[in-house]
Image (cartoon, rainbow, N blue to C red):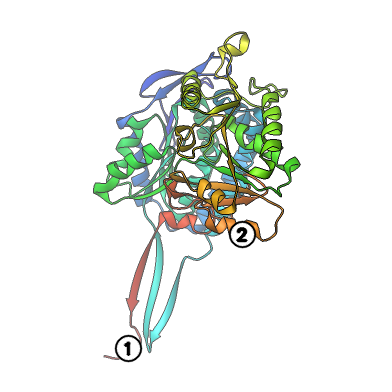
Amino acid sequence: MVSKNHAQHWINGEWVNTGLTRETINPSTGEVLGTYVKGGKEEAELAIKAAQEAFANTDWRTNRELRHQVLLEMAEAFEARKKDLATMIATENGKLFAEASFETEFVKPGLHFSAATIYTDYGRAAEWGAGKYSILVKEPVGVVGISTPWNSPLALLIRSLAPALAAGCTTVLKMPDQTALTNHLIAEVLASVKSLPKGVINMVTGGHEVLEPIVSHPAVPVISFTGSTKTGRALQKESAPYLKRLSLELGGKTPLIVFDDANIDALIPKAIQALTVFSGQFCMTGSRILVQKGIADEVRKRLSEELAKVKVGPAMDPQYDMGALIDMKSVKRVDGMVEDAIAKGAKVLVRGGPYTEGELAKGAFYRPTLLEVKDSQADIVQHEAFGPILTLEVFETESEAVKKANATEYGLAASIWTTDVDRPLRVARGIEAGTIWINDWVVMRDEFEEGGYKQSGVGRQRGMTSINEYLEMKHIVLQPGVIQ
């Protein structure tokens, strides 16, 4: 029996206890939660070998009925452990229990959607001449390497894993150190899926020392990575010699674009939520608010008042509005960005910042900060903070709003606020971003694609095209009806 306070790798259906033993920390208290084994090249290669053998020696890649059954069983297994998973995520990750519970809600529909795609669009055939036929066959690419970030370890894992399994691929999962006990619990759930063949899913906890051998291994033709733009660029370089297919969801600087006719009563609570969900550690965090001049004073005043009221504290205590950052290192980094922005001319509307005394000073807590800037090229606007820092900019015209919204290298998402029925689509067409919400923020559907423009990524997750990331297409020509 594996101790619940010690996390191990899960490879070829077995627990693997090799690697460096490390501690995992509760970011709300700084206390040690347990231990885990940190993997490296040896564990990564063991996982790749298991995935190769499962792909080559089982009927997983050709048995659609089995894959469908496994995904449905996985959905029920995760559903049965939702509370346990949410509790572990909140404790180890620092996000509020309500937010961790929200994360678990993405699992079942995501698995069900991918299960449904197994029976749709698997090729086509046509007779292009008398007795002459072409057949387009779609086949799984083989072993897929999936790298999952710590900010949403369950939801973002399933987002990549479900379509990869539906396609018939086998997988190697590189899971983050920061959520080692959560990773182990996820593996326990996977191990309970009776129809899942050994080696189809293999999980290793670790950092770049695990990811690098996966990316550089010639037997892993596809990498699905969610994380920073900087790392995404590095992965492209590392994988270039093998011409690997990369699916990358990277950084973001989501703007909320607020026009004079916006419903401010609806905007303010949504803007607070957009900044504070997951403590601002979210690729789609609403980290910029662009406000038209006519309502700038009112939005500035009300937003400042409400942000100052946000109660920051331990994830499992329901009285708080926002949890901790992932670690004290992040607190120091985020505060450094704020100090740098202020030194360079940003106006402080709400300072926020870390706790320096009392019980909360022991945790990685950071109160929301609101800074007003005039230059869209300011570092605090251009660089992803991955923390609760919101910048406010004022614009006058619609064209200026679009220009400001597009002024960063990122293009993951945007939010447009207006009651004009004609403006939303017109502005949305001018915004360089993969997802755009009108009078809302973070509405995601498994049926519709998600991904970034520019430096926010390559490829798409969710939607009908998500499975294509893991499929090859083969054109077969035969002429059985032609008389020679």
Neighbor class of circle 2 (other Cα within 10 Å; few <14, some 14-19, many 20+) is few
- Which residue is depicted at the point 66% across and 31% down? 83
Q: Residue furthest right?
A: 265
Q: For numbered disc 1, what is the local secondary structure?
A: loop
Q: Is residue 257 left or right of residue 481?
A: right
Label 2 vs label 1: CA separation? 53 Å
The mark closer to the camera, 2 or 1, is 2
Q: What residue type is labelled 1?
A: Val
Q: Which of the two residues, 480 or 368, is positioned nearer the viewer here?
A: 368
Residue 431 seen in the figure: yes
* x then y, percent, for residue 409: 43, 44
Q: In this view, does 347 lie above or below 401?
A: above
- The residue carrying mark 2 is 425
Which dot marks residue 379?
none
- The residue carrying mark 1 is 482
Q: Which of the two residues, 86 or 397, is positioned nearer the viewer here?
A: 397
Q: For numbered disc 2, what is the local secondary structure?
A: helix
Q: In this view, does 183 lie above or below 314?
A: below
Q: Which amino acid does label 2 sit on?
A: Leu
Q: In this view, does 483 lie above or below 295?
A: below
